Image (tube, rainbow, N blue to C red):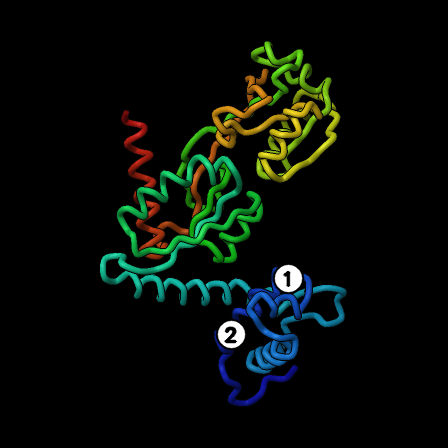
Amino acid sequence: MKMKPNAAFPTLRQLELFRALAGSDGIANAGAKLGMTPSATSHALRALEDALGTDVIDRNAPGIELTYAGQQILPHVRDVLAALQLIQTTANASAGLRAGLLRIGSFGASSSLTLLPPMLTAFRARYPGIDVLVTEKTDPEIEQELIERRIEIGFVTLPKPQFDTLPLDVDEMVAVVPAGHELADTDPISLRELARYPLILTHAGSQELIGHMFAQARIQPTVTHELQQLISILEFVAQGHGVSIVASLALPDQHDGVVYRRIRPRASRQVGLACLNERRLSPAAAALWELVRNRAARGRES
């Protein structure tokens, strides 16, 4: 495609479409995420390529595949959209953080049920005018959301050297067994003993760590179910369908029909907050970051 003389700069809508294309399985689906019809999407994509003077999508590829030019442009598009968001949130927050929007990513029950609620309670008490949008996804998806600037702050498992991070808590893996199970009176339970029974695993954040536990011990467990929701795992165990391993921070204090037991050898993960660059956070995100940092410091001192 040849560069048109006096081509206009891409519009904000076109740049938003391009960012959506990079994470979609089809051009129409990318546009639908922005509320655009297929016709409007096709027109906007062509106008974007006309403005840039080059194709950004390889139309001969089976799915959405960026051209070399598109791959080179994408990080700059993300930077532009992040900068515009920062301009807006800074303007909204210019009068003492009385308004604005903060986007946070959470990877599951450990963060959503245990770590995040007290943070939000303290933050909203101090900044009631700031709207907080929480997105719950898997740990890898949260990392991608941070990279793509769709969220400013996210809960992650540490270490994550590619981000600025704040350590929050240590999440230990524990066994969940039926209350009347023959292992219910054993504490701790060895990993080898646990592997003798059907295993019900999470399909969320701690799955990789649990797999690593068994690989290190050279044990091949029999996984009979992989479930997304914690309540489903607890109910399956309570009904005698197997045993499970769950991150301790994700668990309620008690659940009818199950008991929690330590595991030998121990395994844990460190959970923290992450952002791309703490010096470039919006005022609302920077306020939450500083609040969490101060709370963590007070916790270490006590």
Could you give the CA–CA distance between mark 1 and mark 2, rounded to whole angstroms? 16 Å
Quarter assignment of residue 239: top right
Please provide percent x and percent y for residue 180.
64, 14
Q: What's the mark number on residue 13?
A: 2
Task: Look at label 2 and name its amino acid.
Answer: Arg
Q: In the visual, does 130 lie left or right of 5?
A: left
Residue at disc 2, secondary structure: helix
Q: Is residue 21 above or below residue 131?
A: below
Examine the rendering and report whether any part of residue 117 can be seen.
yes
Most extreme residue toward the left, as rendered?
A: 95
Where the N terminus falls, by quadrant? bottom right
Q: Local crowd at mark 2 within 10 Å, few (<14), some, or many (≥20)?
A: some
Q: What's the mark number on residue 185?
A: none
Most extreme residue toward the bottom, as rendered?
A: 5
**What residue is shown at x 60% (from left), y 10% (from top)?**
186
Task: Look at label 1 and name its amino acid.
Answer: Ser
Q: Is residue 148 above or below residue 200?
A: below
Please provide percent x and percent y for residue 236.
66, 29
Q: Is residue 294 above or below residue 39?
A: above
Could you say which is closer to the camera, residue 253 or residue 5? 253
Quarter assignment of residue 71: bottom right
Examine the rendering and report whether any part of residue 276 can be seen.
no
Please provide percent x and percent y for residue 27.
66, 69
Could you say which is closer to the camera, residue 179 or residue 31? 179
Circle 1 residue: 24
**What residue is shown at x 44% (from left), y 38% (from top)?**
272
Q: Local crowd at mark 1 within 10 Å, few (<14), some, or many (≥20)?
A: some
Where the C terminus falls, by quadrant? top left
Please provide percent x and percent y for residue 173.
55, 25
Q: In the visual, does 252 lie left or right of 49?
A: left
